[in-house]
Amino acid sequence: MIKARSTPDFIIIVVTLVLLAVGVVMVYSSSAVVAAQKGDPFFFTKRQLIFAILGIFAMFVTMNIDYWIWKKWAKPGLYFCFFLLVIVLLIGKEVNGAKSWLGIGAFGIQPAEFTKLGMAIFLAKWLSDNQKMIVSFTKGLAPTLGIVCLAFGLIMMQPDLGTGTVLLGTSVLMIFIAGAKMKHLFGLAFLGVLGFAGLILAAPYRINRITAFLDPWKDPLGDGYQIIQSLYAIGPGGLMGLGIGMSRQKFLYLPEPYNDFIFSILSEELGFIGGATVLLLFLLLLWRGMRIAITAPDLFGSLLATGIIGMLAIQVVINVGVVTGMFPVTGITLPFLSYGGSSLTLMLTGIGVLLNISRYSRI
C-alpha cells in the first residue's frame, strides 16, 4: 500500500472554493429579479448555498476516502446509474422539454449528471484491468464503447444532448489515454459525426438551433433569441464591466440567466477582466488535474483523474462556447458557477476524488 501524503493539492482546494464563492455571488446577482417574482429575491441563492454546503461536505468526505475503494464499487455504481436512467424515463419530471429529473420533495436530481462520474469510475477500472485488450477493436474497444453508447442512448431518450456529449467526450478521452489505436478512434469519430448529424436531423428543434447558431439574427425573437441576448450582455461589459448587480440583461431579457448563461451575466457585470480571470482559474484547475493524472501511482488513478478533469474541461469549453456564440445552444452548466444542485454536488464530489488521488501522486 502506497503511503498517502498528509495534505492534498492545496491549489485545487483554493481554486475550487474561489470559483464556488464567485458562483454563489453571481447566482444571487443574476437571479434576484426572477426570484423576486416568487416573493423572495434570495430564493435561488438559498438553494444554491444548500447544495454548495452539501457539495463541500461531499468533497471533503471523498477527499479522505482512498480512491482504490471506488474501483471495488465501479460496477454496482454504474448499474445503479443505469437503473436511475431507466426510472427517470418512466416517472421523471419534464423540465424544458427534457424528462431528466427525479423529484424528491421540493428538490430534484438529474441521474444523467451522476452517470457522468459513475461512467468515469467504471471506465477507469475497466480500462486499467483490460489495458492490453484496448488495442483490439473486437475484444477491447467495441465492448467498452458499447457500454458508453448504452448510457448515451438512455440520456438521449430524455433527451439531453448536452450531458450526453460530455459523457461521450470524457469517455473517448479516457479510452484514448488508455492506449486505443488512433485508426480505430478516427474511424469511430467519422461514424460519430454521422450519428450526431442523424440526431440533429431527427429533431427539428436541433436543426433550428444549428441555423440559429450560424445566423441568430435571422430569427431574433425565436431560436436566435438566447444567443443574441447573451451577446448583448457580454458586449456592454467592456473591459471592467458594469459592476456587481448592475446587469441589464437579467431583467427578463436573457432567459434563466442564473443557469447555463451565467457567464454572460458575469461578463456583463465584471467585464473582460472578470471573465478572463474565471477562465484562468479553470485553466489552473485543469493544469493541476493533468499534473495529478500524470503523477498518479497507478493506471486506475491516472485514468480516473483524467476522467474527472476531462469532464470539467469539456463542460467549460462547451458552456463558454455557447454563451459567446461559438457553439449551438445546448443545456450545459458552467461548473461551480451555474445554478443547479445535481451538477454542483456531482462536480464537487469528483473534485474530492481528484484531491484524494493527489495525496498519492509521485511528486
Image (cartoon, helix red, strand yellow):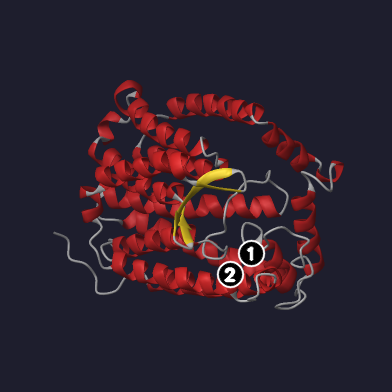
- Mark count: 2
Quarter occupied by the C terminus: bottom left
Kindly identify which numbered label has been placed on residue 258. 1
Q: Is residue 26 above or below residue 113?
A: below
Quarter occupied by the N terminus: bottom left
Label 2: which residue?
A: 44
Task: Locate residue 121, reporting x and y percent.
Answer: 32, 48
Q: Residues within 10 Å of mark 1 (few under 14, many from 20)?
A: many
Image quadrant where residue 45 sits: bottom right
Does residue 3 appear in the picture of this structure? yes
Amino acid on which the number 1 mark rests in the picture = Tyr
Task: Locate residue 181, reporting x and y percent.
Answer: 40, 29
Q: Residue at x 74, y 42 (%)?
A: 213
Q: Residue at x 70, y 78 (%)?
A: 244
**Do the numbered discs 2 and 1 sit on residues whose CB atoms are within 8 Å?**
yes
Task: Locate residue 54, reporting x and y percent.
Answer: 40, 69
